[in-house]
Image (tube, rainbow, N blue to C red):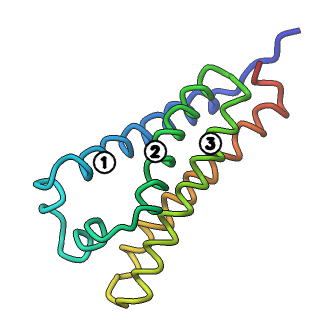
Amino acid sequence: MKIKVHWSFKLIALLGIVWSALGVMNYLMQTMSPEFVASFPDLQRTLIENRPRWAKVGMAVSVFSGLLGAILLLLKKPISFYFLVLSLLGTALVVVHVLKVAGETNSFALSELIMMAGMPFVVSSILAWYPKLAQKRGWME
């Protein structure tokens, strides 16, 4: 008996791929293009330029494992869960760095904190949780 996959499954997987692909592009531009980083406002540029190694590694893990996990999710592979959890852990490292700098400088607006820390963490959390829901409903192989 074949279980019909809800329409939202493909939508969420595709949005996860787009989100993660944009993250990969952002990461590559930040690491390979000083001109790109120079185009940011002073506060964000300082955050990027002074990012410690552990936060750089966290960002790389977040975006690359997130992209692989989202692709595997679209392919209905249960292993996607592990890559998306790894992505969430990488995102957590980046969020810790952003909040640490925000606490030290006290110069970030709430909207900036939401965009740089809150939104990535929420999206990563949803993407890490979703494969287990899909498995429970029989949508994965």
Q: CA distance from mark 2 to mark 3?
A: 10 Å
Identify the residue at image location x=10%, y=54%: 35
Which of the numbered marks, if any, corresponds to residue 26? 1
Amino acid type assigned to the residue bearing label 2 in the image: Val
Q: In whole angstroms, how far apart are the C-alphas of marks 2 and 1?
A: 9 Å
Q: Estimate the x, y position of residue 135 in percent, counting from the top left.
A: 80, 31
What residue is at 33 percent from the left and 48 percent from the top?
27
Q: What residue is pinned by disc 3?
A: 84
Sequence-earlier tag: 2 or 3: 2
Looking at the image, do the residues carrying marks 2 and 1 touch, with CB atoms under 8 Å apart?
Answer: yes
- Please name the residue shown 71% across and 46% down the image: 129
Viewer-closest of 50 and 8: 50
Q: Residues within 10 Å of mark 1 (few under 14, many from 20)?
A: some
Please report whichever mark, 3 or 1, sits nearer to the chain's N-terminal start. Answer: 1
**Mark 1 residue type:** Asn
Q: Residue furthest top?
A: 1
* Residue 139 point in image, percent of width and height: 76, 24
Residue closest to the far right: 1
Residue hosting label 2: 63
